[in-house]
Amino acid sequence: MLVKPTCFTESMGLLPHSLLQRVALSNISVVETSKKLFYIHTYACKTSLLNISRVNAMALSPSSEIRMQLGLCLLPILFIALASTAADLQNPDFESPPSNLPENSTAPFELLTANNTIPGWTFDGTVQYVTAGPTIALPGNGHAIQLGQDGKINQTFIANTNTMNYILTFTLALGDQNCSAIADILVSAPDSRGVFSLKQHYGKETWESYGHYLGGWRDGEHINLVIQSQTTEPNPNSTCWPIVDTLLLKGVATLDKGNGNLLPNGGFESGPDFLSNSTEGILLDPVSSPIQSAIQQWSVLGTVKYIDSKNYFVPEGNAAIEFISGISTGIQTASTLTEGSAYNLDFTLGDANDSCVGTFILGAQAGSTVQNFTLQSKGTGSAKNFSMTFKADSSVTPISFLSYSSSQTKDGVFCGPVVDNVILQASYGLKPEIPSKVTFCWLVFLVAILQLTM
């Protein structure tokens, strides 16, 4: 009897054997439907292929095994071909200007009135169209919208049938640095509400990008996204009003546990989109619910930065988490385990290659088991694998990572330890290993002998 293979990527979940066969036996035409395709995490596919090859080596004919291997290798292509992107927002970066603006105007701020319309958006209250310049920095140095007193913009999009959850990336900037109060931004949708502010600055730029979980809806539902200013300051003239720019809407499917990993999204590949014109990461503010988190299945303690492999050192895959807001900053999840059984928790600890020098102290906790781990960082991009063994105290076991150190670069940028590749396994489970050429030759030899004796 053949073992039916399943292959996991953190954006796809489990794919059945019948689908793998169809991939292996058919021609696939790949059409890029969007630049914002989901990230693919292929490590589990590779380990799944190795495990399946071992188990089925004696039962598969060479041609069928080749087809199965081909199917597994083509999974990323299949995903790109079949994935349907989230509903795109119209005019997400406000580069399509409002109607009826003064001709040849060079003013950095243009107050919008009832005579103006913003393509894709409706607005109320005090709203201004912003142009980047010497005193105003924006991603790509383009245009944005400032929300003044009672300022609000909103847009309605239609939920997509192939997407379960929506994650929003957006950028905040300030138009004036000389003020006694800074207004907040309220981002809301039918399933969520989040308040964001630039009162604490973490990056090198004068603007910051944030990630926010919007919610999950059925196919065809009309979702109203609302962004508005919020302040308790009685004098609007002494308030710095926020500037909103570059909104990205990303859809992610419901995650499942990976091949050999009891934690969904252990590699943090499922998270908010990164800005193509930014070298900064995405800030994630505290979120108590792992279900309503921009990094799916993980709650956030303090403020962390979601970093990409294009601009930072990431130990594995395309994304990782950097703990930047000091002591007690971290992430947490929970897993359903067998009470009294032993498990291994493996993870990678490193630095983001962002000149963050110092001693990183990270606390890992699984149930009642707590252990501290230390990494000496030179800020040049390094990582080390760690492991701890624990016994499940209850059927639902919390898993958390907390930073016990606070760090800044010479430029005053907040930084800290990077966590990636978190894997939870039963302690008796064997980790997949890549077989050597000699081992592979022995497998082929054994298959040949068995076929001759049958």
Image (tube, helix red, strand yellow):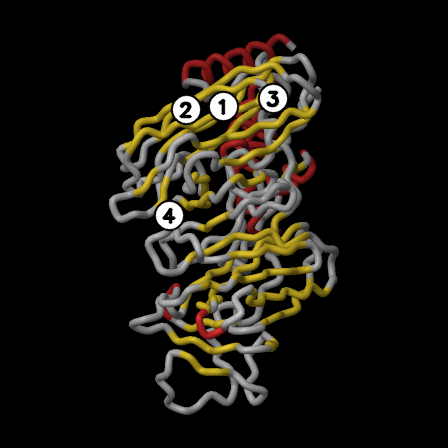
Foreground: disc 4 or disc 1: 1
- What label does residue 135 carry, if any? none
Query: Which of the two labelled residues, at mark 3 and mark 4, occupies the earlier sequence position?
Result: 4
Q: Which residue is mark 4?
A: 310
Q: Residues within 10 Å of mark 2 (few under 14, many from 20)?
A: some
Q: Amino acid at mark 1?
A: Asp
Q: Which residue is mark 2?
A: 385
Q: Residue at position x 37%, y 24% from top?
A: 374
What is the C-alpha distance between the residues marked 1 and 2? Answer: 7 Å
The furthest residue to the bottom: 103
Distance from disc 1 to disc 3, alpha carbons, whole Å, reads 15 Å
Earlier along the polypeptide chain: callout 4 or callout 1? 4
Where residue 296 appears, as percent x and y from the top left, is 59, 42
Q: Is residue 222 above or below residue 406?
A: below
Residue 347, how many percent across, how many down? Answer: 47, 27
Q: Residue furthest top?
A: 453
Outermost residue toward the front in this view: 234
Amino acid type for the residue under numbered disc 4:
Lys
In the rendered structure, are the residues bearing label 1 and label 2 in contact, judged by CB atoms less than 8 Å apart?
Answer: yes
| Separation of residues labelled 2 and 4 (CA atoms) | 22 Å
3D distance between C-alphas at marks 3 and 2: 21 Å
Residue mark closest to the camera, 1 vs 3: 3
Amino acid type, label 2 = Asn
Which badge, 1 or 2, comes first in the chain's sequence? 1
Task: Tell me the quadrant of the picture where the N terminus can be found.
Answer: top right
Q: Indicate the secondary structure of the residue bearing disc 1.
A: strand
**Whole-Å distance between the Cαs marked 4 and 1?**
25 Å
Describe the element under mark 3 as helix, strand or loop: loop
Q: Do tag 1 and tag 3 residues touch (Cβ < 8 Å)?
A: no
Q: Which residue is mark 1?
A: 346
Q: Which mark is residue 367?
A: 3
